[in-house]
Amino acid sequence: DAKTTQPTSMDCAEGRAANLPCNHSTISGNEYVYWYRQIHSQGPQYIIHGLKNNETNEMASLIITEDRKSSTLILPHATLRDTAVYYCIVRVWGGNTPLVFGKGTRLSVIA
Amino acid sequence: GAVVSQHPSRVICKSGTSVKIECRSLDFQATTMFWYRQFPKQSLMLMATSNEGSKATYEQGVEKDKFLINHASLTLSTLTVTSAHPEDSSFYICSASFQGLNEQFFGPGTRLTVL
């Protein structure tokens, strides 16, 4: 079972920041927070991951609370192409451990 | 990032036939590959994990005799749906990883329709 809780859906105006929350209150000390997204009828796409520090890359920023029980993915300037289902996943380090997907958040970016 | 391909991208078959789906890592050697299934409006469900040269490990509820997985090389894994039924119609997605690498790279998916 997924160890994360996310809102079912969110809307965001084009050009504005999209803030997607995730609750992972049972996260273990050796588990990372990963974010993937899935655009309709495509395979998931990696966005970002972090352990306890905030992280930023060309796609997004990840803010993790100090107690690590929740996090927020920030898309700074959402575009219509960011419309997708966003999945927050906790997992230990290592590519040979599978990603377990929850229901995710369906983000709709509106013009 | 690394590229993973799947073939075919979509397939339609008759009930009772078998269908093979290929998953290839194009620019890296995948020591581990995963197979997922996704029904409409649902999330991805892990079916099995395969390590190169070893038998696949199937998730609970996935019939290993129906969904045959072969990971014979470091760049290729195949999923064969045997004696397909309409309820096997789904979106099948593979992902690949390399030992020591943290990320998993996903293929574009294969849409299977069983008539």
Image (cartoon, rainbow, N blue to C red):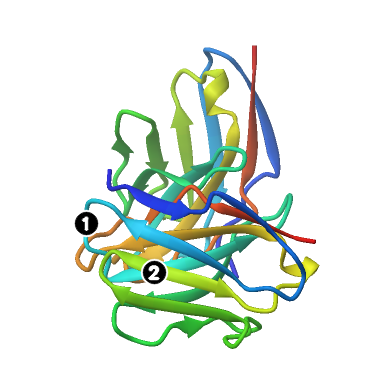
Q: Residue at point 27% right, 59% down? A: B102
- Going from the N terminus, do you reach mark 1 or mark 2 first? 1
Q: Is residue B94 left or right of residue B111?
A: left
Q: Residue at x 39, y 87 (%)?
A: B55
Element at label 2: strand
Q: Is residue A26 visible?
A: no
Of labels 1 and 2, the one closer to you = 2
CA separation in Å, label 1 and label 2? 13 Å
Asked if B114 appears above or below A43 in the picture, the reply is below
Question: What numbered label is drawn on residue B11?
Answer: none
In this rendering, the answer to whether B96 lies above or below B10 is below
Q: Chain of mark 1?
A: B
A62 over B85 or under it: above or below: above
Residue A94 visible in the shown view: yes
Residue A34 screen position, x and y as percent: 41, 52
Q: Quadrant of the C terminus of chain B?
A: bottom right
Q: Which residue is labeled 2 in the image?
A: B77
Name the residue that disc number 1 marks.
B28
Mark 2 packing: few (<14 Cα in 10 Å), some, or many (20+)? many
Residue B77: name its quadrant. bottom left
- Residue in front for this viewpoint, A28 or B114: B114
Q: Are marks 1 and 2 on the same chain?
A: yes
What's under tag 1, amino acid-wise?
Answer: Phe
